[in-house]
Image: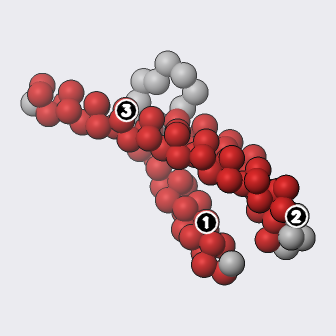
Amino acid sequence: MIKSKISFCCFLRILATLGQDFSNQKIKHMNYYEQLKQLVHGIEDDFIKFYEKENNAAGTRIRKGMQDLKVLAQEIRTHVQDLKNKSSKQG
């Protein structure tokens, strides 16, 4: 259980550093960083309910939220790779 909390804290630090890189990108939809923050913030209460109050339903919501994060992370990875490939072909 402690390992999960440590990993989540590290994940939050990584998210905090990502915001700086996206500020100059032209994205039609909401900024990816903002979407990540909203997803993480949305499951914060469930982490507390699951780990501190042992609420199993909150664990299910955490798993769903983490799946949503995984999908968004893959979308971001694809977007970043496309931008990287596009810039390497131009330069």
Quarter of image, res 62: bottom right
Q: Is residue 35 left or right of residue 78?
A: right
Instruction: Work out whether residue 48 can be spotted.
Output: no
Q: Is residue 57 above or below residue 21?
A: below
Q: Residue at x 54, y 32 (%)?
A: 31
The Cα–Cα distance between marks 1 and 3, rounded to whole angstroms, is 24 Å
Tag 3 residue? 79
Depth check, front residue: 67 or 86: 67
Determine which residue is flagged by label 1: 8
Please tell me which residue is depicted at 48% across the width and 44% down the height of the picture. Answer: 73
Query: Mark 2: which amino acid?
Result: Asn
Can residue 86 be seen here? The reply is: yes
Please tell me whether mark 1 sits on a helix, a strand or a loop: helix
Residue tagged 2: 55
Q: Nearer the viewer, mark 2 or mark 1?
A: 2
Q: Residue furthest top?
A: 28
